[in-house]
Image: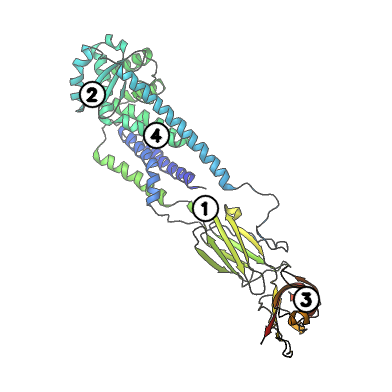
Amino acid sequence: MTAPFDLAVRASVVVLVALFAAALLCRQSAALRHRLLAAGLAGSLAIVPLSWATPAVIRMTPAAQPPLVAPMPIDVVEPARSEAPPVEASTVWTNLLLVWIAGSALRGLWLILAFERLRRQLKRMEGPGNTWDRLLPGAAAAMGVGCRVSLRAVSGQLAPGTWGWRRAVIMVPESAFAWPATRVRLVLLHELAHVRRHDWAIQLLGEIACALYWFNPSMWLARNRLRRESERACDDLVLGCGISANRYGTELVDIARQQAGGPYAAGAVPMARTSSLERRIVAMLDPTIDRRPLTRRAALACGALVLASLMPAAALRLAAQEEVRSFTVQVFDPTGAVLPGTTVELVDAGQNPRSATTEGSGRAVFDEVSPGDYTISASLPGFRQLRAAITVGAARDRQRSITLQVAELTETVTVRERRPPAGTSPLTRGAVEPLRIGGNIRAPRKLQHSAPEYPVSMREAGLEGIVPLEALIGRDGTVTSVRVLSADVHPEFARSASEAVGRWVFSPTLLNGEAVEVRMAVSVRFSLQD
């Protein structure tokens, strides 16, 4: 699981805790449940910065890796093969992440358009009349609202609503000009209760959480429950001002019957939603319901409960299960046998090297290898050094099989001769020392040596030269072929060197007990001395 989806899971935990606690407090006041749900939605948004600041306290151990398959006897670096190449998990999570971002962007755009439409309506609004202006100061004093509140009228059959925070706006339909003073006062008390409780800002918080986690049903459930508890808490405040429950319920039903929803439902807090009106009226008429406003102690208790679930959710993460962090290399020889003791080096794009040595199973493991481009090299005495560029990707692409080839032998022969007219001297045999080879290979030993002769025509002409050769030692130890590697060699020198090297005899080269062919690089130097 990638980090963004890990955050979504932990945000769900915080919201579900708030929903469960609100269900347990069904006999408590609506204001308490509303504050608890608001704290849960705020915690779902705070999980992102807290996850960055809080270190993970649980790291899941990756599953054991399957054994690697022995590769073909060629000099390659290849991923461990499977019969059907799987779809990389990173590709699936990337596609899901793009869908997530697209959904959040669409939901956010819808909110922005709703706010813009409401803003344009507010510019065209005018004061609803003397009755509203006359009753507003008294209703604000009764509800304990000291901030600036303005009145605006909206065309159409819309339910009264509240918009804004520091400079709140109470919006009413144009038909409200003819409402009686008793209904006007009830509407003002209800909307001022929203202003007092800062419900517009809290509801906006719920909309942001739903836009971010649009695919999560727990977020929508918490937002809808938050709206219902907001209306019930405002109803409790209105009833606390001495308003009769029967009269208040009757007015709400009449307003809901005459008005039709509202185009600013996402940007404002409407007074009468038909979907929740029945429950509100039932709650108004129930004398056993707790209608006390939220106290400071209860608010702190709600914050402590959400914080108690938020901190563990931020720390107990599944980030270590996102991908296998180790990188495994297994080294083979051309026969398919493993090669322990091989030095494997891994160099990242910043030229930072890391080395490891293969164990008895031929494996070398590098811990905490991030996805990216690397250069890998492997070396073992007796084998050719391998160096290649690789890309480390998802969990299924974190194993490599390496095949090392038998190294070529190197032979240097120097042929010296006195310059004429001095007499000849014996040819000097070059040092014949096979490359030190360890592991599962036995180096060949030279059993018969034949020294090259200095061509007479070349000596008399005073010419010198170096002949680079490549010889192939057969399985029986005899030289089966000799090839001159340079075209800038005189044929006399090349013929003398090739004939001499072709007569050499070695002991068989054994790899894991079997005789194998091996190439040998030979350099024959013809030089004159005074």
Q: Residue at the spot x=59%, y=58% of the render? A: 389
Q: To which residue does mark 1 refer? A: 321
Counting residues from the start of the chain, the first of labels 2 and 4 encountered is 2
Viewer-proximal residue among 402 and 319: 402
- Can residue 414 be seen by looking at this rendering? yes
Q: Position of residue 56 (x, y in %)?
A: 42, 54
The numbered dot on residue 208 is: 4
Amino acid marked by disc 2: Val
Q: In the rendering, which numbered label is found on residue 492?
A: 3
Q: Secondary structure at mark 3?
A: helix
Residue at 73% over, 88% down: 421
- Please say if the residues under marks 2 and 4 sit with CB atoms less than 8 Å apart: no
Question: Residues under labels 1 and 3: Cα distance?
Answer: 69 Å
Query: Looking at the rendered structure, which numbered label has been put on residue 149?
Result: 2
Viewer-nearest of discs 1 and 3: 3
Query: Depth check: 177 or 179 in front?
Result: 177
Q: Residues within 10 Å of mark 3 (few under 14, many from 20)?
A: few
Q: Is residue 306 above or below residue 291?
A: below
- Whole-angstrom CA distance, mark 4 to mark 1, is 29 Å
Residue 359 in percent (x, y) is at: 61, 70
User: How far apart are the alpha carbons under marks 3 and 4?
Assistant: 89 Å
Mark 4 or mark 1: whose residue is earlier in sequence: 4
What amino acid is labelled 1 in the image? Gln
Kind of residue at badge 4: Ile
423 vs 136: above or below: below
Neighbor class of circle 4 (other Cα within 10 Å; few <14, some 14-19, many 20+) is some
Residue 422 position in % (x across, y down): 72, 90
The 10 Å Cα crowd at callout 1, few under 14, some 14 to 19, many 20 or more, is some
In the rendered structure, which disc, 1 or 2, sits on the residue that comes first in sequence? 2
> Circle 4 — which element?
helix
Asked if labels 2 and 1 touch by Cβ distance under 8 angstroms, the answer is no
